[in-house]
Image (cartoon, helix red, strand yellow):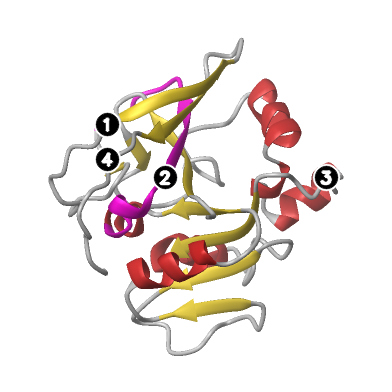
Amino acid sequence: MRKLVYLVAVTLDGSIAGPDGSDPSGPGGFWTPAEDYLQHLIEEYPETLPGPARAALGVTAEGTRFDTVVEGRRSYQVGLDAGVTDAYPHLTHVVFSRTLTESPDPAVEVVGGDPVAAVRELKRGAGKDIWLVGGGELAGALYGEIDRLIVKLSPLTIGSGIPLFGRQAPFSPAAWGLADHTVLPSGAAFLTYDRRPGAAAPDAGGR
């Protein structure tokens, strides 16, 4: 069965974005990734680079981990605000939203129903794993469905921001085992954790 993998950049104090939810590494953001961080993404996770970045960097690698990306409405809005209706044209792109009545892009599927049910259906399908790009609210809703965490730990703190699983995630402790790690000279670390058997959380419901 395919896995749902939450691969996301996180600050040392546990935030995936500032209080306003804007892209931390985008224009005016609080974090500029180091060269070794970008190179590691290109080598290990090329499919997670947005289409415009792939074009600018000359990245054509298909990638071996994901063929589908899922995200929430606020995360998708970051791309829309930049004039990009499909940031991942090389992947099957699913956006969960109860406010978008139709997709701004024919290649992007908008799902207005329960994200847990939709992700379970995706997992039963054939293909590579499913990448949960964010944001925190959707990650909280899918908390019990996440099979693997890949934390791109950035070497900075911001004091307050949007937590890894949003502000309304259920209290449901789960155990994770460290499966892989890479620490870069710049101080960033890529930490991979797999949910331990029997550690699944109860359904968190939709958002």
Q: Residue furthest left?
A: 171
Q: Which residue in the protein does label 3 denote?
A: 59
Q: Sort mark 4 into few (<14), some (14-19) or many (20+) by Cα contacts within 10 Å.
A: few
| Residue 188, horizontal then vertical, whole percent | 52, 20
In the rendered structure, does residue 195 fall within the stretch colored magenta? no
Region in magenta: 141-159
Which badge, 4 or 3, is on the more N-terminal residue?
3
Q: Which residue in the protein does label 4 denote?
A: 198
Which badge, 1 or 2, is on the more N-terminal residue?
2
Alpha carbon distance from label 1 to label 4: 9 Å
Which badge, 1 or 4, is on the more N-terminal residue?
1
Q: Which residue in the protein does label 1 denote?
A: 175
Which numbered marker is on residue 200?
none
Alpha carbon distance from label 3 to label 2: 28 Å
Q: Give the number of the mark in front: 1 or 4.
A: 4
Q: Which residue in the protein does label 2 denote?
A: 147
